[in-house]
Amino acid sequence: MRQGQSLVMTPQLQQAIKLLQLSNQELTEFVEAEIERNPLLNKGEEDSSGDSERAQSDNREQLSLDESSGLGAARDQLDAPGEDVYEPGTGSDTATPAGSSGPSAKADWSGVGGGGSSEDFDYTANLSSDVSLHEHLHTQLNLAPLSAADRLIASRLIDETDDTGYLRADIEEVAVALGADTANVEAVLSVCQGFDPTGVMARSIPECLGLQLKELGRYDPAMEAMVQNLQLVAKHDLKGLADICGVDKEDLL
C-alpha cells in the first residue's frame, strides 16, 4: 500500500493564484467589476487618516525593533546586489546554479517522468516556472551517463527540438553534420526520449504516444498496432482498426 499527497486545484485556489498575479491597478479593476456584477458586495470606505496614523506608529515600532536587534544591518545586506552564482553547465550551452544537483535548481520537476506515477505529479508545482523546455532538457543531459561525444550528439538533438517537444531534424542529416554513425545517433536519441516530460523528442504523434504508453506499461502488440494506424481512428473505421489490432470491435469502445 502506498500513501501519497496531492494538491487539489479548487476554484478558490485557482482564483487566489490568479489574484496574486495581478498588479494593483488590475486588482482594483477586478474588485470594481465584481462589485458591479454582484449587488450584494459593498466596498468599505477607507479611513485614510486612521490608516496614516497606524502606518506611522507601525513604522516607529519597526524602526525601534530593527535598531535594537540589528535587523536593519541584516536587511541592508540582503538588499545589496548579489553576486552571480551561476556557472556554465557541462555538455550544454545553458547555465546551472553553482552547487546545484539537478533540475530543481530553477523549478520543482521532482516526481515527473523517470518511471514515476502520474498520480504523484503535482501540475501546480510549475505554474510559475520560467524554465524553458530546452533548458530543462539540457539540465537532464548534464545528469545523463553519456560520453563526451554522445553528449555533443544529444545537445544537437535537443537544439533541433521545437517548443512543442517534437524533434524536427532528420537523424541521417544530424549524423552527417556531426560525423557520427546513424545508429549511434539513434541510440543517443533513445536515451534523450527517456527525459521528462514523457514523449519528448518524438518525431511523430504515433512515436510520442508510443513513448507515453511504454511509460505506463501498456504498449502491447494490440496497442502498438492501433498507434501505428491512427488514420483509421480519424476515419472512424473501428472495424478495420479492430481487425488490424486483432481485437473485437467492442474492445476499442
Image (spheres, helix red, strand yellow):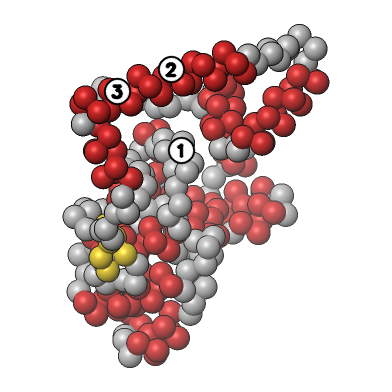
Res. 10 image quadrant: top right
Q: Quadrant of the C terminus?
A: top right
Q: Which residue appears at 39% of the width and 44% of the height?
A: 216
The residue that disc 2 covers is 57
From the top left corner, tell me how far across and down residue 210 is, in percent.
46, 55
The foreground one among 71 and 159 is 71
How packed mark 3 is, by other alpha carbons closer than 10 Å (few <14, some 14-19, many 20 or more), is: few
Frontmost residue, 166 versus 230: 166
Disc 1: which residue: 123
Q: Which residue position is annotated with label 3?
A: 64
Q: Position of residue 180 (x, y in %)?
A: 31, 86
Question: Which type of secondary structure does the marked residue at label 3 adopt?
Answer: helix
- At label 3, which amino acid type do we have? Ser
Residue at 73%, 11% in the rendered image: 42
Label 3, label 1: how many angstroms apart (C-alpha)?
44 Å
The residue at the point 41 percent across, 69 percent down is 158
Q: Determine whether label 2 and label 3 are within 8 Å by CB.
A: no
* Crowdedness near tag 2: few (<14), some (14–19) or many (≥20) residues, C-alpha within 10 Å: few
Residue type (three-letter) at the residue carrying disc 2: Ser
